[in-house]
Image (cartoon, rainbow, N blue to C red):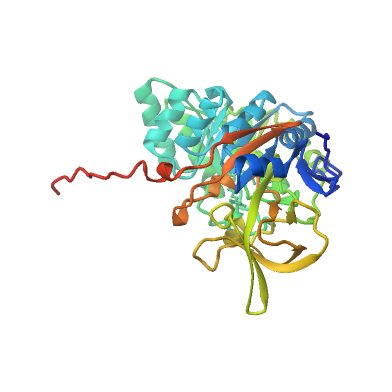
């Protein structure tokens, strides 16, 4: 099998040629690293998500190198892709993780991470989840309100521990995110403590017996291309650090600037990682704090494709439709965020067509691309939907009682099924044939 490095010289946030997606065309057919995608489709079937371990390692290593001048830790955010094989690749790179639920904590621990590797965040943590986080001995719990802070103090007291805690600040900066659903740091967002209440919450934290105030945190949005939002937000966090120190509250160890680094899905121009680091690192250095980041998409977004087979080609109302075996149940991003994902034929096409690429789900909003000029394809052809490594499988659903597809990890010229395709019995096994009726 040929060893493939991507031929794509697309511009990602690193602003230079990178291992773009691990996918390249060799002899007219698409490979992921050294494995022909057709081979995966033949052996595993479709729809299947295929991830490149090399791209994941490359992205992590680049970000790690860019931040090297300041003490830092990269906590990969599980919500982007929580497959345990992907997590193990990152654990071997010495990454930490960022989780937002008891379920993600469970996955992270099952993938071999220990409590000290874990940041626990989320706007609506339950009492049970806070308890689980403390029992696991996580590095940091980022709270989003005074009420949550007081609850955490009480639970820590009951467990006889001191809770390592950060405040998620809403820095109230405007960002250029691709879609309003993925902006999180503007005034009035549901996330974080409003900027003008942070000092008051920090003062409360400093007085609570079972709380150690260790961090200020922000996450301003996702798929960000400009550095200014990070700079403005970081400056606001640092102002708060200075004010707290002036008041004698000097327990802080970490500055967590969240995730959000954008990746290229199409031909987006983005700032270089070096520029990002040049803007952020000196600011954090001055505080003496350890920089934490919670990237998700940047690490895995370009590292995955979705393999789908065309079931039918149909012409109706003057339009061509490619109806495939994957749709909104496999990749929600096009219908939910109007997101663009590049689509290519796995076998080199000799012509182009303009088509709506849709799935089999009974919804008109079930599409992967609309009015797309793309490789010509027909029934039976395999398509590769690019850049689905982040927010792909994790947002899949069983709507229309559709089993979720398989996940495959490629590493060099080997591949492995890391999540089996769901079976019909998996879809009904929690339902009770003989329900236990109770008196109301
Ligand atoms: N930290 C926090 C607190 C977050 O809420 C998120 C993402 C991240 C880190 C990671 O952000 P990233 O580096 O991946 O941009 N489903 C949407 C994206 C939602 C992002 C939610 N929060 C999509 O498909 O575009």
Q: Position of residue 18 (x, y in %)?
A: 83, 41
- Number of marks: 0
Q: Residue at x 56, y 23 (%)?
A: 112
Q: Residue at x 75, y 55 (%)?
A: 344
The foreground one among 399 and 317 is 317
Q: Is residue 328 left or right of residue 102?
A: right
Q: Is residue 244 left or right of residue 437?
A: right
Q: Would residue 172 be visible to someone looking at this image?
A: yes
Relative vertical location of residue 185 with respect to residue 407 in this rendering, above or below: below
Q: Position of residue 156 (x, y in %)?
A: 40, 26
Q: Position of residue 379 (x, y in %)?
A: 66, 60
Image quadrant of residue 177?
bottom right
Q: Position of residue 98 (x, y in %)?
A: 57, 35
Q: Quadrant of the N terminus?
A: top right
Q: Residue at x 77, y 46 (%)?
A: 30
The foreground one among 76 and 427 is 427
Q: Would residue 234 be visible to someone looking at this image?
A: no
Image quadrant of residue 148?
top left
The foreground one among 35 and 311 is 311
Image quadrant of residue 318?
bottom right
Q: Residue furthest bottom?
A: 317
Q: Residue furthest top?
A: 160
Q: Residue at x 57, y 37 (%)?
A: 82
């Amino acid at each position: 099998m040929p060893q493939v490095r991507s031929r794509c010289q697309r511009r990602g946030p690193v602003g230079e040629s990178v291992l773009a997606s691990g996918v390249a065309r060799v002899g007219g057919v698409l490979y992921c690293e050294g494995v022909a995608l057709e081979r995966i489709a033949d052996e595993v079937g479709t729809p299947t998500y295929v991830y490149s371990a090399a791209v994941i390692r490359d992205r992590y290593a680049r970000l790690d190198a860019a931040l090297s001048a300041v003490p830092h830790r990269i906590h990969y955010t599980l919500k982007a892709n929580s497959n345990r094989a992907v997590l193990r690749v990152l654990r071997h790179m010495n990454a930490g993780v960022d989780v937002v639920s008891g379920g993600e904590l469970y996955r992270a621990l099952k993938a071999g991470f220990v409590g000290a590797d874990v940041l626990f965040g989320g706007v609506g943590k339950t009492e049970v989840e806070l308890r689980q986080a403390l029992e696991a001995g996580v590095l940091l719990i980022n709270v989003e309100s005074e009420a949550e802070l007081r609850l955490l103090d009480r639970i820590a007291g009951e467990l006889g521990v001191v809770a390592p805690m950060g405040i998620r600040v809403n820095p109230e900066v405007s960002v250029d995110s691709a879609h309003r659903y993925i902006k999180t740091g503007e005034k009035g967002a549901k996330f974080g403590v409003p900027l003008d209440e942070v000092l008051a919450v920090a003062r409360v934290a400093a007085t609570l017996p079972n709380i150690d105030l260790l961090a200020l945190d922000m996450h301003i949005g996702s798929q960000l291309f400009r550095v200014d939002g990070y700079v403005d937000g970081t400056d606001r966090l640092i102002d708060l650090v200075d004010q707290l120190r002036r008041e004698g509250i000097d327990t802080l160890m970490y500055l967590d600037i969240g995730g959000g680094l954008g990746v290229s899905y199409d031909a987006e121009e983005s700032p270089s990682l070096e520029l990002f680091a040049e803007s952020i690192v000196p600011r954090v250095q001055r505080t003496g704090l350890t920089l934490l980041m919670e990237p998700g998409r940047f690490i895995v977004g370009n590292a995955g494709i979705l393999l789908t087979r065309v079931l039918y080609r149909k012409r109706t109302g003057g339009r061509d439709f490619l109806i495939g075996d994957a749709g909104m149940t496999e990749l929600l991003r096009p219908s939910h965020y109007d997101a663009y994902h590049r689509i290519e034929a796995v076998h080199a096409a000799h012509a182009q067509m303009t088509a709506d690429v849709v799935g089999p789900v009974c919804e008109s909003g079930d599409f992967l691309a609309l009015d797309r000029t793309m490789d010509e394809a027909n029934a039976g052809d395999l398509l590769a939907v690019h850049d689905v490594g982040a927010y792909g499988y994790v947002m899949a659903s069983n709507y229309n009682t559709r089993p979720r597809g398989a996940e495959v990890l490629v590493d060099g010229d080997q591949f492995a099924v890391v999540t089996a395709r769901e079976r019909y019995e998996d879809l009904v096994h929690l339902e009770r044939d003989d329900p236990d009726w109770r008196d109301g």
